[in-house]
Amino acid sequence: MKYKDSEVTTGRFYTTIKNALSMMTAGDLLYIHYSGHGTQIPDYSDTELNGYHEALYLYDGPFQDDRLVELQALTPAGVKVIAKLTVVSQVICLQKVHVIISRTGFIRCPVYR
């Protein structure tokens, strides 16, 4: 699926990924590409080492990193998720991140320019 601009809401982003994961089986691959703004939100629960949640800034507001962890927990065994995130924020001028998500954790991949 391909969404852009006002179509990329926090609810649709989460639901689309969740629904895709629910249909996948071992050996399948899900590719997620995000190019846009990012932000940091104060962490009042004191779970983040730097005191902030990182977030993608979607059309209707921030999509916190904790939501990605929720989706990670829903990833079936043997399914790979590759997320290409190109994020611009006030804190980081430009950060390109390629991440492989599995049930056992996030693996940061090198970015080739």
Image (cartoon, grey):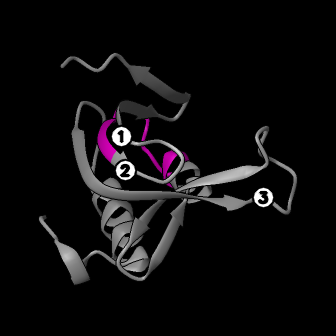
Magenta span = 71-86
Q: Nearer the viewer, mark 1 or mark 3?
A: 1
Name the amino acid type tagged 3: Asp
| Residue at (22, 17) in percent of width and height | 112
| Residue at (51, 69) in percent of width and height | 62
| Mark 1: few/some/many CA within 10 Å (<14, 14-19, 20+) | some
Name the amino acid type tagged 2: Val
Q: Left or right: where does residue 89 sit relative to residue 113? A: right
| Mark 2: few/some/many CA within 10 Å (<14, 14-19, 20+) | some
> Which residue in the rendered view is the most extreme toward the left?
2
Q: Based on the picture, tell me whether residue 80 belongs to the magenta stretch.
A: yes
Using the numbered discs, state the Cα–Cα distance from disc 1 to disc 3 in whole angstroms. Answer: 22 Å
Name the amino acid type tagged 1: Leu
> x and y percent of residue 7 in the render?
23, 81
Does residue 113 sit above or below 6 in this rendering? above
The residue tagged 2 is: 88
Look at the numbered discs 2 and 3 and tell me whether their residues touch, using CB distance below 8 Å.
Answer: no
The residue tagged 1 is: 94
The residue tagged 3 is: 43
| Residue at (24, 30) in percent of width and height | 27
Q: Earlier in the sequence, mark 2 or mark 3?
A: 3
Q: Earlier in the sequence, mark 2 or mark 1?
A: 2
